[in-house]
Every structure is written in C-alpha cells, then in structure tokens.
Amino acid sequence: MKLDLITTDRIIEMAWEDRTTFEAIEFQFGLKEQNVIKLMRKEMKPKSFKMWRKRVQGRKTKHEKLRTFSEGRFKCSRQKQITQNSISKR
C-alpha cells in the first residue's frame, strides 16, 4: 500500500499517541498493527523505533480489548485538535 506523506505523518502521530488504539488506526487507514509497526520501523531512526516499541508494547491503552473503560473516550486537556483526522469530521 502506497501512502502519501501527509497520511504517513498522521499514522506515525497516531501511533505515538498513548490513547489512540491500533484498531482506530486500522479503522481509519486500513493498516493492521503489524503494518503500523513495519511503517514505524521504516520511517523512524532505529533508536526512535526501539523507544516507541518499548513504550507501546503491552500498553493497555493501545489495544481496544485491553482497555478498562468501554464507553466514551479520554481526551487530555493539553491534546491539540486534529484537523486532518477523517474520524473526527463525522
């Protein structure tokens, strides 16, 4: 799958966000978790990729099934408004 620069940047941004699940990335962009990992490995410096993997591995908020809350969503007061997110425009 060929992704443009804006889409690639958005996927990377979502992957770094603690509360954005891999399922949300798959829903919006059609990339499964393994494909997101491959994209991150390809686009990031090796040290940055290792830091990201360590950060997200086993993190409950990155996997919908592991979350402790079932409804609603958490949004930090410091989180910036995302303008190019097609889900938020619904």
Image: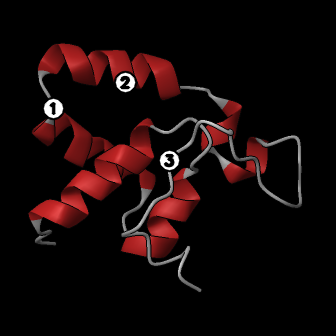
* Callout 3 touching callout 1 (CB < 8 Å): no
Q: Quadrant of residue 84?
A: bottom left
Going by the image, does 7 lie left or right of 3?
A: right
Q: Which residue is drawn at 19% across and 35% down?
A: 41
The residue where tag 2 is placed is 52
Q: How far apart are marks 3 and 1 (CA)?
A: 23 Å
- The image shows residue 6, relative to residue 21, as above or below, that is below
Pick the front one: 73 or 31: 73
The residue where tag 1 is placed is 44
* Callout 2 touching callout 1 (CB < 8 Å): yes
Foreground disc of the pair 2, 3: 3
Q: Position of residue 89 (x, y in %)?
A: 53, 81
> Is residue 19 in view?
yes
Pick the front one: 71 or 81: 81
Q: What element carries label 1?
A: loop
The residue where tag 3 is placed is 80
Q: What element carries label 3?
A: loop
Disc 3 marks a residue whose amino acid type is: Lys
Q: Position of residue 63 (x, y in %)?
A: 64, 46
Q: Which residue is drawn at 16% across and 72% down?
A: 1
Of callouts 2 and 3, the N-terminal one = 2
Disc 2 marks a residue whose amino acid type is: Trp
Q: How is the image coloured?
A: secondary structure
Disc 1 marks a residue whose amino acid type is: Met
